[in-house]
Image: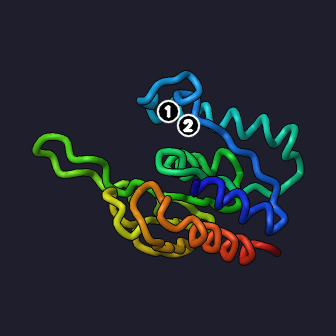
Amino acid sequence: MDLVAATDAAVSEGFTVALVEQPYRVAGRRSPAGAKQLDAAWIAVIERLRAKALAGLPLVVGGRSLGARVACRTIEQTGGRAVLCLAFPLLPPRRGNKPPQSRLPELEAVGVPVLVVQGSSDRFGIPPAGKGREVVEVAGDHGLKADTDAVGEAVGAWLRKLRP
């Protein structure tokens, strides 16, 4: 639902949208491959889209949860001019007695504008705003289903600011 809201907002702002399903999901698996494999697959998809359907268009990349992490990690390789993160999983689930390692460095490494839309009660935490990074909290949890209108409004407002 949040992806639909973000897509609708982007289209209404005049953006062309390509929705990409992660390869592990296409294969019917619930567990993702390792980061290197996910990143390589994402880069290959973006390269193909930029060579064909999105040729010559400025690129805003993004994703939801794990997909947002992949978009952040690969922004330099994909040449995107901004990153949209829906439900960025800041803190992984606790495993044993180990404290969770924050994924904030993945956001901090992004050198282009970033929008993070996060549920106000997301069990994976809420990233802080930062240089070039806007964080919008909406009602709900990690699923971002409680207020999809707010998700769409946040995405649309941010995309308007990206226009030259």
Image quadrant where one finds the C terminus: bottom right
Q: Residues within 10 Å of mark 1 (few under 14, many from 20)?
A: few
Secondary structure under tag 2 reads helix
Q: Nearer the viewer, residue 37 or 20?
A: 20
* Quarter where residue 23 is shown: top right
Residue 118: give x, y in percent of width and height: 46, 65
Q: Residue at x 68, y 46 (%)?
A: 78
Secondary structure under tag 1 reads helix
Image quadrant where one finds the N terminus: bottom right
Task: Report the amino acid beneath label 2.
Answer: Asp
Residue 154: give x, y in percent of width and height: 61, 73
Answer above or below: position of 52 versus 120. above
Specify the label residue 39 is tagged with: 2
Specify the label residue 143 is tagged with: none
Horizontal side, residue 146 vs residue 156: left or right:
left
Answer above or below: position of 94 versus 146. above
* Labels 1 and 2 touching (C-beta < 8 A): yes
Q: Residues within 10 Å of mark 2 (few under 14, many from 20)?
A: many
Residue 69: give x, y in percent of width and height: 49, 49
Q: Nearer the viewer, residue 118 or 91?
A: 118
Q: Residue furthest top?
A: 27
Q: Residue furthest left?
A: 97
| Residue 88 visible within the image | yes
Q: Residue at x 60, y 69 (%)?
A: 149
* Quarter where residue 16 is shown: bottom right
Q: Residue at x 53, y 71 (%)?
A: 133
Specify the label residue 36 is tagged with: 1
Answer above or below: position of 87 versus 157. above
Q: Residue at x 31, y 55 (%)?
A: 91
